[in-house]
Amino acid sequence: MENQNLNLLDRALGLDGPSEPWPLSGRVVLIEDCVETSGSFVLHQLVKRSLSPTSSNVIIFVAFANPFSHYDRILRKLGCNLVTQRDNKRFIFFDMLMLRCPDVDEGKSSEGGLVLLYEKILKTICGLPGDKKDYVTIMIDDISLVEVAANGGSDYVLDFLHYCHALTSEFDCSLITLNHEDIYSSMERPTLILQMEYLADILIKAEPLSTGLATDVHGQLTVLNKGTSHRLGRSGNKIHNFHYKVKENTVEYFYPGSRV
Amino acid sequence: MADTTCRTLRDGGLEGEHAPALTIKDSKASPFGFDVFNYVLTQLSNYILAGKSQSRGLVVVAYSRSPSFYVDLLKRRGIDIASSHDWIHILDCYTDPLGWKNRLIDKDISQEASSLSSFCQDVRNLDKLYSLIIEQGKGLIGQGKDRFSIAIDSVSEMVRHASISSVAGILSNLRSHGICMIYLFSKALFLLYNLVFLHCSMAADQVSSIFWLLHSDLHEIKFTSVLEYLSSMVASVEPFNQAAFGQRVDLENLSMLEQNFRKGKFHVRFKRRNGRVRVMCEEILVELAGIKFTPVLSEDEIINQRLLPKRYGFVQQVQFNLQLSEEERNERAKVVLPFEHQGNGKPIQIYDGRRSLGENKEEALVSTGKLQPDEDSGKGQIIYFRDSDDEMPDSDEDPDDDLDI
């Protein structure tokens, strides 16, 4: 892997090791952001990293937030052509913008739509050629909109996430999800986000600085990398904290105080 | 103390009593409950394999991890269940808890159940789950008088699919033996236990011990306390630094967060038969090889330790240097003390103050001659002449006590 391209985020995620097997396989990554600091750039970075020529990953991208053209434009700036990747069957895009689970009133339970989505994902993975099956990354953007699609039934969302989690142990694929932390901040017991945190092996938090707004720093990332007892070996619990600045074509990561 | 917990589970229950039950609870701030669960599971497996425990088999109800995870876990700890698994059975509530996958089976996606694990495809039906657990447990131990243990990971998942009362009911059924006793309950719990006893007719007399995992912050306090009432031991994992949780990360609480991520406090509450409750504390260290428990000193011991520093502890607090370095200590050992070099075969020299100048000169020469090589070797020496023969070497009597003042 080209070491000069590795940034602090890659290191925190353990991507600095050998790219085969994919360091995130079998793991669940949760990105938590808030209104002031959007964490979607982390998702874009991970798409780019997964689709890099050195890896043989296949991404199943479940988009509830934006259409394909949105991601295509951003990734193009980052130097990755999603249209080509889609044609190569390395980027499989599920447009879920219009997904509305049937209401309970209509005689069906709200989980119906999510069961179909799970079915679709499972079929896609099973339909992949044997050598690609082991390198699947499922990305969901974002969970709060899945909840909206399920008519606010967070239990259905959790069931869906559980099934996605089961896929990670069955096919050794990785699951990367994005959620907004602050929309649950007023709840006394935000079960959905708590449960997601219990499921996650790696938690990436994008937050504003505790000292307030700054022009040169857009926010800070805290990466909690839980120790894994994966068959690839065991690593200990690690925590990383650094600042970032989102630029037009790239994101800069740096340790607090290392910029003048 | 974690071992005490495991031993209690190992020893099981007496005839006609509830099986010992352990609740392992954690929270988001210190999410090591699962590590503790794995630890207890491994210990109990070791006891069962060694034939030391009351139970002869173990049923793992897997809600949040796949059966292969447990096979891997036990393999890493030196227990190979892939080859011989007549003592363990995993009830798989993880792979397809709601039967979503089952609907696709006709479309080329098959599910293989092994003799090690079996699927539960409707976790909402707790009666069925209960009979599955009992059935699998009996399958392990046969028809004899042997008993088996149950591990549930986790009750938090269980309660997501069923009501609190039915979950409490099944847990109580599993550990009870079918003899109805009169209990005194608080009013809030009364209805719940009514329900429990309705189920008692099905109760199993063959459960030796049971333990389960619970993420306490996912539930109302009511549910957590119901489970605590149901268990004879409650092991709770708490964060090492309470303050660091829930704040925005900055440099100050980052180190605290880091600490919380590596260690936690471990409290166990034992409930004895006679109603005595004992609480013990330990520290948990999460390491690469698993978790480690270290004893925590009681408050008195901590205070004593602060007031009465250990060896060198006090010296370290002083600003100036009271310690000798290793080199200095060696140098000091080389110095020959005043009386040590006299009487070792060499002529004893006594200074009487009346010697002639010449003799003194000679002595001076002798002494300088002696000193010369010593300086080269870097060795210190003290030259001393006794005042007279009267003075005994190393005499400690008061030289002035013959004075008549």
Image: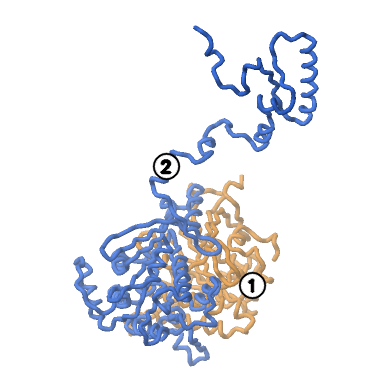
Chain colours: A orange, B blue
Q: Position of residue B30 (x, y in %)?
A: 44, 59
Mark 1 or mark 2: which is in front? 2
Is residue B385 depicted above or below A194 in this figure?
A: above
For label 2, the crowd category at 10 Å Cα-Cα, with few meaning under 14, some 14 to 19 and many 20 or more, is few
**Which residue type does callout 1 highlight?**
Pro
The residue that label 1 is drawn on is A21
Separation of marks 1 and 2 at Cα, in angstroms: 53 Å
Q: Is residue A143 above or below residue B96?
A: above
User: Which residue is farthest bottom?
Assistant: B106
Q: Position of residue B392 (x, y in %)?
A: 62, 21
Chain at numbered mark 1 = A
Badge 2 amino acid: Asn
**Helix, strand or loop for disc 1:** loop
Q: Which residue is mark 2?
A: B304
Q: Residue at x 51, y 39 (%)?
A: B313
In-image side of A236 versus B37 (left or right): right
Q: Quadrant of residue B224?
A: bottom left
